[in-house]
Image (spheres, rainbow, N blue to C red):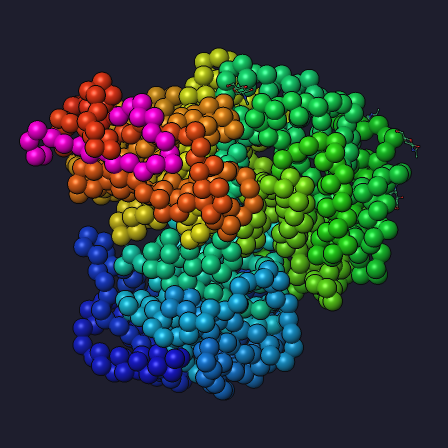
Amino acid sequence: MAKDDFESLRSEAEKKSTGWTNPRVIALLLVAISCAAILCTTLTFFLHPDQTVDGDVPPFEPLPTDPDEMTIVERINCYPDRNAGEAERICLARGCEWQPTVVDGAPYCFFPRGHGTYRLVLEQEHTWGMRLTLERETYTPSFFGQDIQTLTLDIEFQSRNRLHFKFYDASKPRFEVPIPLPPRPNEGAINTDYAITYTARPFTIKITRKSTGEILWDTSIGALIFEDQFLSISTRLPSSNLYGFGESEHRSFKHDMNWRTWGLFARDQPPGDNINLYGVHPFYMNVEYGGNAHGVLFFNLNAQDFTVQPTPALTYRTVGGILDFYMFLGPTPDHVIQQYTELVGRPMIPPYWALGYHLSRYGYENLDNLQKVVASMREYDIPHDVQYSDIDYMKRNLDFTLDEENFGGLGEFVESIKAEGTRYIIMLDPAISANETGYEPYDLGVDNDVFIKDEFGDLRYGKVWPDYPNITVNSSVDWDTGVRLFRAYAVFPDYRKQATKDWWIDQITKFKEIINFDGLWLDMNEPANFVHGSVDGCSENIYDLPPYVPRISGGGPIYDKTICMNSVQQLDDNRKENHYNMHSLYGWSQTIPTVDAVQQLTGMRSLVVTRSTVPSSGTNSGHWLGDNGSNWPQLRYSIIGTLEFNLFGVPHVGADICGFFNDSPEDLCRRWHQVGAFYPYARNHNGIRYQAQDPGSYGEEFAVSIRELLHIRYRMLPYLYTLFYDAHTQGSTVVRSLMHEFTHDSHTWGIDRQFMWGSALLISPVLEEDTTVVRAYFPQARWYDYYEGMEISVENLEVAGGIDLVAPRDVVPLHFRGGYIIPTQQPHNCTKFSRLNPFGLIVPLDESMEAAGDLFWDDGDSIDTVENGDYYLMRYIFSRHILTSSFIHVPTNHPTALFENLALDDITIYGLETEPSVVKFNGGALDASSFEFKAETKVLSVKSLDHPMTDVFTLAIEFSESP
Ligand SMILES: *[C@@H]1O[C@H](CO)[C@@H](O)[C@H](O)[C@H]1NC(C)=O
Ligand SMILES: *[C@@H]1O[C@H](CO)[C@@H](O)[C@H](O)[C@H]1NC(C)=O
Ligand SMILES: *[C@@H]1O[C@H](CO)[C@@H](O)[C@H](O)[C@H]1NC(C)=O
Ligand SMILES: *[C@@H]1O[C@H](CO)[C@@H](O)[C@H](O)[C@H]1NC(C)=O
């Protein structure tokens, strides 16, 4: 097992003595030799010359040739600390080198080459892999004097494509992320696509993709530090094609590798440049220059930051837990995400209605205004699946209350719009006001001991939305004064406790009697706090004043905008834990009982949308990208955020359409809808007191344009829903980048202004003001315009930088990719009705005149339909000019009910060679009036088939001369 791999490595390395043509391999060889010359004990090293070299793609970015420059890009920062004072002295005291440089962002203080912190002292083989024991070098100076002397490194060969390795302290348990992961797969190490090599002194590790020889990880570039509150590890990366890591607003999907440091720690923070946002996803994907992809999860959710640099290299730094990594070898991007979600959990399939259009705002002010907005949606017949209420439905922002004065009758109104097919979602915040009299959520919460405590066992008080009772708020005072004078004390439920879960579910149950919601929306669950730490600040303690504060909180303390890190929470049934370790898990812990509550109460698959997420959040919830602004750049970044959350296994995601803060000009809101119509989670949401931005608010012409646009989305909902089935069953992404599908085309690696639904649909939206032209890139494939069916001509394929498409203000360029069949359904005003409409098939042909695709169909909102087998899975295949349908799965119970009275009406085939003479459906020639061929576009449309979905069919195309 493990041993075989090591043996095979050794022998391969011995066998290969010629063919060192690759510059990177030569460079590494030199490093290995020079390293050996100093003091390295190289146990084994592996260099594989058989690189896959992709025709027109340079296999590697050229390495810098200037030796000085090369040293600088190799520098690993030895003084990442915030306080700039005495940097040089501290740097030298850490045994590091100090050398100012003019290279922007490069560190002055860096680890010397071969800097050793640990050496290997023991190797043990196990059935699951290797256990290595490392001893800290006594001569190595310390960062903060809390070093763990003896480390254990377990390297588990979990499956062919999954490797787990973790550094920990075997003598003393440390915090580990409590998100449950499935048991280790039992495939063992046979045939792994990775090989591990390491050096003993200093201890460094390399992970190699065996099939190509690419070195995926190589820690020899930097020091390994494992202190109680400062843990750091650096690795070289095989390429600078780095994607993922969140939650942050990234301005490019492919990371900027030019000395960027990003903090990760859950935070109530509107998106902005380089500041940690609501959730934490320490997961990246790297695309190697040969076109293979791998992914790495750092399974650590303590406050952390990471640095990327042009070497290319990556440094992780965290303030607690252990150094716990999972690597997924792909080799395609979608394989990587499938392997990742196999570990952290496959995404849920949202209820069908959750794929419709959602409308929300903060600040409807009263029921009357809300009713007017809904009436305007009806007037213009705009698809409207979900309506929301933000905290302003509450009485003075108190959870589980209704503002009877302004929203009296909301319950009845909700029932009335539900009867029309629109669902309702309301917001809940975690913080509970402590200053009310006779406020049951607080009183029962105290009785049942459900709130987070301070270090003395008393309630930890912060302040969030609710004001004190019986006061008049002076809204002209500044924010901090207002918080101090008017905001009530608030306490924070400790959702890991069973008593808290019971209390929360009980409160939700009672409130559902008042408003019969269909789903819940969880805000402020980082947890957000308007006073820093608590109403009294935080004490001086090692958690609130750790020796290292990562690049978070905009330079503020670690407890900035949240509760003190020494607050005490429940970890599990028996153990308590500091907020320091539990912080970023708060939203996750709240979401679990919330999902339980809504599903118990509705008896249906429901929708819970959470602001704070972590790995595994996609298994039970969706996410919006937070409080963005109504501006063009954030429209553009929303595509990047949506792509990233698809990598994180949270595919039901989107940004607030038209933007949350500030007024949204008509042209921005129009273009934003053109992007948002293709977010998996399509919600228009607005902030309080800004100009209305619901589709009806800009006049009739705008409303009609949005209706037509949303009809495109609704038409393709069966396809979007099927993509969620693929995500749920295989872990595939729903929205993806062009890189994801055309990984071997290096032009796609940096594209983040276009995105795809699955493999089939390419969206190339306008993202700038006053523009009716879009630059769009088309990789090698057949592509057909959505609207007219024109095929992108061969000379316009693979044009570096893209070609110009015309996009008048009402048009978002959309293209079908040949080879992928898209199931459709005629749109309606909401999914309740669109689900009854006739189906259709879009059949764009590929170079071999073939196409295939699936349709997943269940009742749309029962729980666990896939697990219970209560669904249809249809497969459509077009080959040799015949389209056939077949059932891959029929419902285990009530086999026909799901498709009852549903028909297939139209089939549109793109890219035929020439005009058909006969079109036969189930053997019978169709009347010439029921099909149409457009010679100019080569599109064949067959209409009005009215074929029952419960029956299979064939459609055969015949030509008078063979094409
Ligand atoms: C949708 O249209 C139907 C009539 O076909 C109507 O009864 C229903 O109220 C409408 N629903 C919405 C959400 O507009
Ligand atoms: C709010 O509640 C806290 C905690 O019980 C208390 O200390 C504080 O005095 C109260 N403030 C007001 C204005 O009632
Ligand atoms: C605050 O007002 C409520 C009525 O809104 C009243 O029942 C309560 O007694 C008042 N509390 C105080 C402290 O005045
Ligand atoms: C409200 O606050 C402003 C600014 O501090 C102050 O000038 C004003 O007098 C206050 N109004 C009342 C009614 O207290």
**Position of residue 11 measured from the top left corner of the image (x, y, whole percent):** 27, 83
Vertical relation: 914 (above or below) 680: above
Q: Quadrant of residue 662?
A: top right
Residue 756 can be seen in this image: yes
Front residue of 560/466: it is: 466
**Position of residue 459 measured from the top left corner of the image (x, y, whole percent):** 83, 53
Region in magenta: 942-963
- Taking the spot 28% from the left edge, 46% from the top edge, the residue there is 747
The C terminus, quarter of image: top left
Q: Is residue 593 left or right of residue 255?
A: right
**Position of residue 718 measured from the top left corner of the image (x, y, whole percent):** 41, 36
Front residue of 60/593: it is: 593
Vertical relation: 111 (above or below) 239: below
Q: Is residue 505 left or right of residue 418?
A: right
Vertical relation: 34 (above or below) 266: below
Q: Quadrant of residue 719?
A: top left
The N terminus, quarter of image: bottom left
